[in-house]
Amino acid sequence: MRRKYLVFQDVHVMMFIGFGYLLILMKRSDHKSLISYFLVTAISLQWGTLCYGFFRTINGKIHWRLTPKHLLNADFACAAVLISCAAVAELTTPLQIFLMSLLEIILYSTNNWIGSLASDVGSSMFVHVFGAYFGLAVSFVLYRGTAYCAERQSSKDEASNDSIGETLSTAVGTMFLWLLWPSFNACLAKGDAEQFRAIINTYYSLSASCVTAFAVSSLVFNCFVVFQNSTLVGGVVIGTSADMMINIWGAMIIGGLAGAGSIFINRFSTVSDNLDIMALNFGSSIKGVISLHGIPGIVAGFVGAIVSAAATI
């Protein structure tokens, strides 16, 4: 029980520090955003627990004893909400984010129940893909592309004042996520052997994506977004197949290719200095969410399918 609680604490820290500082607070680093983020996270955990139980009722009543698995599933639902919130953080008020969170967790739990037979130990498909594209849809509804030029000019004027705070916030969130991601991918593994395998595969996939991202970025472009997104993408891509027999070299190949691919996605999604395709249509924060969670989550699904098809046992 103590070991399970320690893993749960790792995932819990990711929700309140990792995702918070990386995804939300870097956009609005003030006490109001901190309080609203704290409130949304706490409510999402409670609502996620209830929604998880609604799909496991007997005669209209929830009949299960709370275990660390239920707490972890609530954290995973919260993670999907935080990913979506990152896509719309600069477009919404705290009340709108709160209402979006309640609706999203209902849909997330429904989607999770429908796909409950799928093997996705790190929830790359159920958490990262769902959260990213739910946020993309909300951002598309809320954002006005015609206001992009004015926002871009005003953001340039304010960049010198906010860059230090954003950089520190991003660094704190990135480091916490990078350190604790193996626990996130391994916490729902069924046995001790599978859990340890998921930790090892995630560990080496993250290391490979980090090294490859910095190596490729020196050839393509030099930007802090490399540190923010591309060093973490290995943890997302390996999530679905983390507990499978892919060996250390397989995990490093997957993570390395993911890190390099993330660099090119970030580089070539910007056509020119004045025309950013993703920002023009969905808001300026959505590109990082898609490049870190959306596309890598889809790739993780294909990797899991290939590894499962190639398994001999």
Image: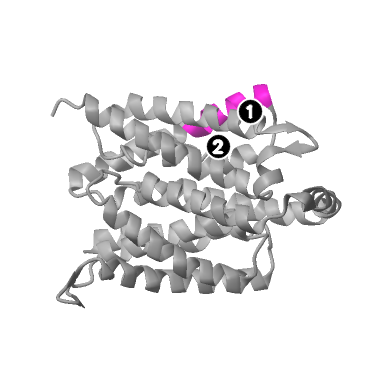
In the displayed structure, would residue 87 be above or below residue 93?
Answer: above
Dot 2: element? helix
Q: Nearer the viewer, residue 165 or 89?
A: 89
Q: Tell me which amino acid carries mark 1.
A: Ser
The tag on residue 270 is none
Dot 1: element? helix
Cα separation, mark 1 vs mark 2, equals: 10 Å
Numbered circles on residues, count: 2
Does the magenta portion include 287? no
Residue indicated by mark 2: 230
Q: Tell me which amino acid carries mark 2.
A: Ser
Q: Nearer the viewer, residue 197 or 285?
A: 285
Q: Nearer the viewer, residue 182 or 51?
A: 51
Label 1 with label 2: CB-CB less than 8 Å:
yes
Quarter of the rendering occupied by the C terminus: top left
Residue indicated by mark 1: 217
In the displayed structure, would residue 93 be above or below residue 189?
Answer: below
Query: Residue 130, position in %: x, y?
Result: 44, 51
User: Is 53 positioned to the left or the right of 273 in the image?
Assistant: left
